[in-house]
Amino acid sequence: ERNHHRNVSELLDNLLRGYDNSVRPGFGGPPAVIEVDIMVRSMGPISEVDMTYSMDCYFRQSWVDRRLAYTGHKDTLALSISMLGRIWKPDTYFYNGKQSYLHTITSPNKFVRLYQDGRVLYSSRLTIKAGCPMSLENFPMDTQRCPLKFGSFGYTVRDVVYRWKIKKQVDIAEDMKLSQFDLIGTPSANQTDQLKSGMYSMLLVSFHLQRHMGNFLIQVYGPCVLLVVLSWVSFWLNREATADRVSLGITTVLTMTFLGLEARTDLPKVPYPTALDFFVFLSFGFIFATIIQFAVVHYFTKYGSGECYFNYDLSSDESSSDDEVWSTSESRARLPSVSGSSRSRTSSFTRRRSNCAPTIEQPHQHLEVIPLSVCTISPITGRKESWTSGLPSCLGCPKIETPEERVPTPPIERPIRSRRRKKRRAPRFNSVSKIDRASRIVFPLCFLVINLFYWYTYLSRSERIIKIKN
């Protein structure tokens, strides 16, 4: 065993005797060919704000250096990492890399293998953070293509050429999983870039990442649809419930605004709207249209109308109403004098006035509300008259006469009321607007049609429907 170690040490000393690690293999002849393959262990995080992605990988490079060829020993020699400082190695750098580093725990994670024909295999474990220019127009139904571009920093195509390995180029670990994306492809290619200092050989691999939509369906799309449906509840509320419908509309608008702002916290401030922005704006538009719809309903049903209160005593069978039937007895008695007739009119007026006066404190009374548009209120012509002068005609009561307006009239015949059972009025419920009835069908139908168009358009653009058909 000691002889074997001595022989390996002597072999390496002989190989490195007179070896210049500053000169590339085959200097003055054809360019050195660097074969590369990558084994990806994990990926993430992927940031839309910084437009970057990170991955942990084994980066392997292989080239042939005839100065290190040997015979008579093992086919492969595993060398110490200290040998890397004594032999030539390519100056590979990542063109779009950001803050990449080599793992050094517990020791630098790299190794060197030397073959008999002079081939050198250099492998290292790297965490690469690279830029990924993202197009977020279809977010969150987008598919991003994150490139990784690398090549020689100083050698042109005359000295070094990079190529992918034929058998394997980019391998993905079987247990690798991403939280927000699915890795659907890793196409690779060779390319040559023309820079000011010359032509450089480059290798390019693109990681095609398709975003998961489950998180956004739960946190954004679902709540938006529920808020829109919640705003439609106002179509089933009475049009007189102004406070309820306005408060419901304002609450849904504010909630929708907060939801839309929260959805963009993890996105960069791009100058174009995303697919998520369109859906949030669509939902906000339907909620705002619900408020406008109620304004239209309120305008056409309440404009120029008011409310007038009538007092009815439901406990008395002798109370006056429009449905009471008056009959005149065959024996009519005339009052002897004008003063008597005046007293009769006064008592009759007093009795009618007592029936018309709204006395809310009594327990067995009912208030009825009717629009003022059906009432006839005489205009105010005199300075001494007030707005109440025309109110008795609305209430079905005779106008109050001043002493100056009273004129002697012939005696009237006192009517005798027949005590019949009063026909009570049926309760008058609030009517439903035709606009509300139409909105109950039009709004959900329009929302459904627009949603079908929205989802079909963006799923087709993201190529998800094509993959499902295939």
Image (cartoon, rainbow, N blue to C red):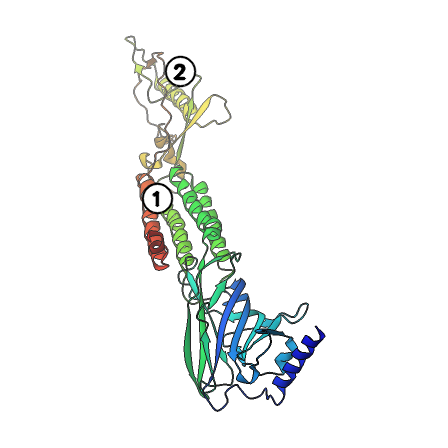
Left or right: residue 128 compared with residue 392: right
Question: Could you tell me residue 317's position as x and y percent?
Answer: 40, 15
Left or right: residue 251 compared with residue 456: right
The image shows residue 234, relative to residue 311, as above or below, that is below
Q: In the drawing, what numbered circle is on residue 444? A: 1
Question: Could you tell me residue 21's position as x and y percent?
Answer: 59, 86
Left or right: residue 305 compared with residue 217: left
Q: Is residue 249 visible?
A: no
User: Viewer-proximal residue, 229 or 331?
Assistant: 229
Helix, strand or loop under label 2 = loop
Question: Could you tell me residue 327's position as x and y percent?
Answer: 30, 13
Which quadrant of the structure image shows residue 200? Answer: bottom left
Provide the residue designation for mark 2.
318
Q: Is residue 371 visible?
A: yes
User: Viewer-proximal residue, 27 or 469?
Assistant: 27
Q: Nearer the viewer, mark 2 or mark 1?
A: 1
Amino acid type at mark 2: Glu
Left or right: residue 146 compared with residue 342: right
Q: Earlier in the sequence, mark 2 or mark 1?
A: 2
Residue at image position (47%, 21%) is: 364
**Cα gap from disc 2 to disc 1, whole angstroms:** 53 Å
The image shows residue 252, relative to residue 178, as above or below, that is above
Helix, strand or loop under label 1 = helix
- Residue most extreme to the bottom: 28
Residue at image position (57%, 81%) is: 70
Amino acid type at mark 1: Pro
